[in-house]
Amino acid sequence: MAYHIASDDRIIQAIRRVFKKYRQVSSQTRLKTLVEKELQTKKKNFQVTGARLRLLIFLHRLADVEIHTREGDPRKILTRCPVCTGSLTRVKNQTIWGGEVTLEFRCKNCGYWTGKKKRIPTRYVFHKNTSK
């Protein structure tokens, strides 16, 4: 059976249905499985990637996301947020000699941050949005 790519609106509706049934989904893989189950019809087999799901959740504020990380290579330079691909802003501090030093990088979209020890996302826990 061939698979089809669902529209953003269709995926958003499926995510909302999942969070009506579940208060918390413990991983991105589990969320992907639940959303694909909601998207299925008798004639079409819809699939969606985990990264696309995560991006739609951040863009439309469909759920609160808890990001679990591990330490990575401190020499690796991050240009984009590894969670939502948004831009990272530098948080700087002034030294006593008048220079500037970057303390950490922050993403305004999703709340991801990293310091000298690079934080690499390993697990996402999705919580039902309580503000809606």
Image (tube, rainbow, N blue to C red):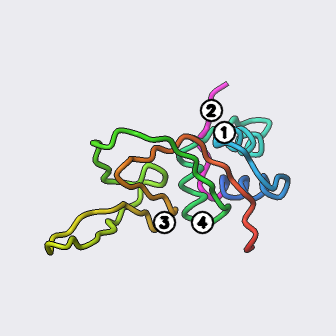
Q: CA distance from mark 3 to mark 4?
A: 11 Å
Are circles 1 and 2 on residues that touch, CB within 8 Å?
yes
Q: CA distance from mark 1 to mark 2?
A: 6 Å
Q: Earlier in the sequence, mark 1 or mark 2?
A: 2
Q: CA distance from mark 3 to mark 2?
A: 31 Å
Provide residue 86's location: percent of width, then percent of height: 41, 59
**SS category of the residue bearing label 3:** loop
**SS category of the residue bearing label 1:** strand
Tell me the kind of residue under disc 1: Phe
Looking at the rendered image, the disc whose residue lies closer to the viewer, 3 or 2, is 3
Left or right: 117 with respect to 77? right
Q: Earlier in the sequence, mark 3 or mark 4?
A: 4
Mark 1, residue position: 46
| Point 75% across, 60% down: residue | 128
Tell me the kind of residue under disc 4: His
Asked if 6 appears above or below 110 in the picture, the reply is above
Q: Earlier in the sequence, mark 4 or mark 2?
A: 2
Q: Residue furthest right?
A: 21
Asked if 99 appears above or below 25 in the picture, the reply is below
Tell me if residue 3 is in the magenta stretch: yes
**SS category of the residue bearing label 4:** helix
Are circles 3 and 2 on residues that touch, CB within 8 Å?
no
Quadrant showing the C terminus:
bottom right
Provide residue 17's location: percent of width, then percent of height: 79, 55
Residue 60: give its label. 4
Mark 2, residue position: 3
Region rendered in magenta: 1-9
Q: CA distance from mark 3 to mark 1?
A: 28 Å
Tell me the kind of residue under disc 3: Asn
Mark 3, residue position: 109
